[in-house]
Image (cartoon, rainbow, N blue to C red):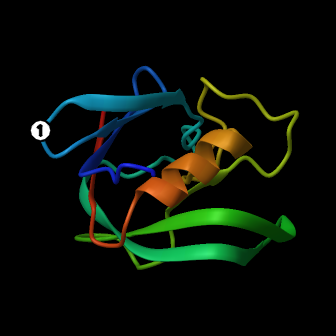
Amino acid sequence: MIELFASLVVDLSDQKLYAFDNNGQMVFSTLVSTGKPSTPTPTGEFYVGSKYANTDFVGNYGRINLDNVLCLNGPGIRPDTYCLHPKPNEHQPLGTPYSLGCIRMGHEAAKFVFQSTERGVPVYIRQ
């Protein structure tokens, strides 16, 4: 049985996501890729507003279909604009800012985070 995460922290300076349990203990971490300087990931206190087992992202880059997507909601952002999801291309790097503002992970990490995180869980994004 998977233990549910109580909170997530994304640290932009070290490009990592940390997951914590109800006792404040870190129980999982993974390398991520966040927004590049021209399209930064917002900082602040947000929460998981939407969960999509499978969804399409559509933009000037075309249409990308992804599994295991958690989208943020909270002050200063439009719902479903910034999401935690698997990287769309296996050749894209982790550990360096590379995205359009979303938080990208490897496919297995994204699946685990998706399964372990419910809607409403706080997500803290810090420098």
Please say if 17 is above or below 115.
Answer: above
The image shows residue 83, relative to residue 10, as above or below, that is below
Q: Secondary structure at mark 1?
A: loop
Q: Residue furthest left?
A: 23
Give coordinates of residue 114: x percent, y percent: 53, 58
Mark 1 residue type? Asn
Q: Is residue 124 left or right of residue 38?
A: left
Decide if residue 40 is on the left or right side of residue 65. left
* Place of residue 1 in the rendered image (x, y in percent of width and height, measured from the top left): 45, 52
Crowding near the residue tagged with mark 1, few <14, some 14–19, many ≥20 C-alpha atoms within 10 Å? few
Q: Quadrant of the C terminus?
A: top left
> Residue visible at 61% across and 25% down?
96
Residue 51: x percent and y percent? 51, 74
Residue 103 pos. (x, y %)? 54, 47
Which residue reaches farthest front? 1
Pick whichever, 95 or 35, lies toward us: 95
Q: Nearer the viewer, residue 114 or 83?
A: 114
75 vs 90, nearest the viewer: 90
Give the residue drawn at x 63%, y 63%: 68
- Which residue does the image show at 44% across and 54% down from the upper left? 116
Q: Label 1 belongs to which residue?
A: 23
